[in-house]
Amino acid sequence: MANPSQPSVGYSVNFSPSQSDTPSPDPAKNAIPPPPLVSPGQPRFPPPKFQLDQLSSPSIRSPNGPSPANGLKTGSPIPHLSTPPGPPVFTSPVRPAAVPFRASPVTPQPIAFSPAASLPTSSPPNFANGSLELEHQLSNVAVDDAVPVGEPPYVLFSAHKVLKLKKQANVPSLGFGALVSPGREISLGPQIIQRDPHRCHSCGAYANIYCNILLGSGQWQCVICRELNGSEGEYIAPSKEDLSNFPELSSPMVDYIQTGNNRPGFVPVSDSRMSAPIVLVIDECLDEPHLWHLQSSLHAFVDSLPPTTRIGIVLYGRTVSVYDFSEESVASADVLPGDKSPCQESLKALIYGTGIYLSPMHASLPVAHAIFSSLRPYKLNIPEASRDRCLGTAVEVALAIIQGPSADISRGVIKRSGGNSRIIVCAGGPNTYGPGSVPHSFSHPNYPHLEKTALKWMEHLGQEAHRHNTVVDILCAGQCPVRVPVLQPLAKSSGGVFVLHDDFGEAFGVNLQRASTRAAGSRGFLAIRCSDDILITQVVGPGEEAHIDTHETFKNDTSLYIQMPSVEETQSFSLSLENKRDIMTEYVYFQFTIQYLNVYQADISRVITVRLPTVDSVSAYLESVQDEVAAVLIAKRTLLRAKNFSDAIDMRSTIDERIKDIALKFGSQVPKSKQYRFPKEVSLLPELLFHLRRGPLLGSIVGHEDERSVLRNLFLNASFDLSLRMVAPRCLMHREGGTFEELPAYDLAMQSDAAVVLDHGTDIFIWLGAELAADEGKSAAALAACRTLAEELSEYRFPAPRILSFKEGSSQARYFVSRLIPAHKDPPYEQEARFPQLRTLTIEQRTKLKSSFISFDDPSFCEWVRSLRVVPPEPS
């Protein structure tokens, strides 16, 4: 691709076009800054949405709630309830991918795929023989437009149509792009093909449902480069209906699978998914209260593991203790020094010794319980932040145990575990001893240099783990700062996650279990191919650009390759796209190829092909815009540049400028006024961006910079569902009979006789009105129903969000109030238009509701939009 650029640090990749290809809008005319050429950032997964079966449940009514234009029902699962004190902990709730990918493109949004049709004829195809007769034959045998193609759920585009004119299409304030979720798990997956694919000899694209085919010769025309290719006679058919027997010619997405038995040296494992080991790396410098909670979570964790799962246990403090499962009656460990990386002699003595350091649960469950019960609290009178912790050395030892051959050698052949092995670090403080450590105090005279050195070392260790197909997840808890910037590179570069918790209690235990059970593909690559008229200007997601030379095989391969440390359902990539030139054809094409090794040791190549129609009409384009997808793409581009709180404040003004620019470019001016009407086709977009502007991602809700950093990284890599929920919360009011009504996330929902559930992706809040709380029986029933809903919503979310419950007027209720749009200041007619449920209240109830609000300076949504000289869009 002619647009490579340096990948950004960590999980986010940012590719930018060369200057010659990039349109350069006049900064004086456009206040929206273009995306940086190289922007480091870390993506995190969007809020989980309700599954279709959950959304259709009769217990949840949403008469006025907007339904996503892309047809997806969005919601957010809620985790197990825990109500620790202090500000909300932003954990990264994303569900792991069921089928990890290994090699190519991004996941486009589920768009309404138009059925396959003949190739565009606006510009004559460049056939090798230039035969008009061949062109006629091709167009006559194109796949019938009536063939249903469905909606591939792996790719979401911000619009279902593309503007032909470059000047109209490349308006940065709205933008055009796609969200790709390579590891998304769906009930009805792609059709499986167990043979080699037919690929274009020129650009490497795969044969697909949109290709034109010559029935007599079986030749097919590539939709990306328009070259003609042979099929070795496979596509010769008496009629085009017979071609539907080929999955790749009848479906927009297929999986090409090569099982491990076809690869030399492969030894099948009875249950390969469960054979990948899990090593717990546990901080032993904990005070008694934290240790009690941790022990409880660890006991529950090992009880939840399947009997075939192999587990290892490593403790770290000033030394590293590797526990031996061969001792059944006592907790026994081999101890290594933590001040330096373990030498090869020490590791060989450990690995080739008589100890068993990885053992299946069915043989070692009692021993694991004995080990956890033997843990003792930290005895010395030293502050938490000043205790020696050799976390880096401990992870090195854990890696060596996973690679060690002794426990896995059977008859001289080493078995390969399925999928990624996993190291889960349970940390209660910073890494302050040994390699990759930082001084105890920030006031150390050489702290900046030592921190920089530690960052590089941790990133290298994560890359080494990734090279050995091992993911490192870091789960932190407690009140001691863990120095997030130092530890994050270890999780990122290995393909793992970094999660903060208030304590080692229930939420920590839930995430511990979900971290171990989520499926992860390894050796993943994403390849993106698109029509020559389309330019990829930026990619943000959990990977980095891979420089793969395919020109010996495909001489004109211009695809963009991205390497993924792991392939999981919680991930997505966001693509920013532009027109290179005015488009003359009727359609543009996108092909995404995801290649990975799944947990069952099969090589998967998932191929997703998308065709979007092109239009001249701006109105037709705007009607095809998916507000929620567009909002998430804008949010990811914005958060990429908000590296700290100061940047976040600056980014709020860019949101304002976006709204003004969209109204100016796509709206209309109010007669005899300086105000502009926002285009009615995208009426949901301003409210979504208002939530983004004042919520935890850009607002002042999150106080500590560590929390902000973790939240930002999680969002930049997150799936669409979780990302959407992190941008805009979902509000559900409890009704009689245990049902729930979905309402706009406005403070008008804070009615004293009601219970409300607010799902904000990384946090779920349950709010009980004062009048309801006074009735003990009713409040208990409402709270139980809300908790049940919260647990159902968060059942598959990883990391699991924290759930907080509180009563109206309590100190913690401010976390709930701050996430709702303050609509109580708007005039009654606007309140009713945007919050129709008010019409069901009596005059007395509305008077009581109005008197319950406290005046403050935050503008309402309508006030904010008017301050930008834009007329608030009518509610849809």
Image (spheres, rainbow, N blue to C red):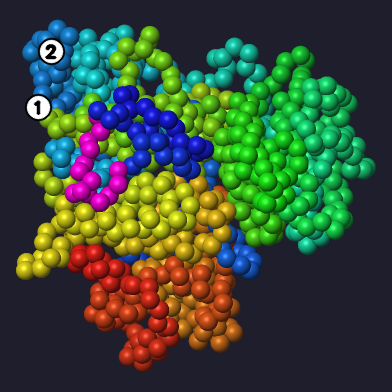
* Residue at position x 46%, y 42% in the image: 41
Quadrant, the N terminus: top left
The residue sitting at 76% across, 30% down in the picture is: 341
- State whether residue 72 is above or below residue 363: below
Residue 312 percent across, percent down from the top left: 76, 37
In the rendered image, residue 249 lying in the magenta stretch gets the answer: no
Query: In terms of depth relative to the viewer, which is nearer, 440 or 199?
Result: 440
List x then y, in percent, for residue 714. 50, 48
Q: Is residue 369 above or below residue 65?
A: above
The residue labelled by disc 2 is 134
Of the residues shown, which amino acid type is indicated by label 2?
Leu
Magenta-drawn stretch contains 32: yes
Give the magenta range.
Answer: 21-34
Q: Is residue 631 left or right of residue 309?
A: left
- In the rendered image, the quadrant that contains the C terminus is bottom left
Q: Position of residue 792 (x, y in %)?
A: 53, 59
Which residue is labeled 1 in the image? 122
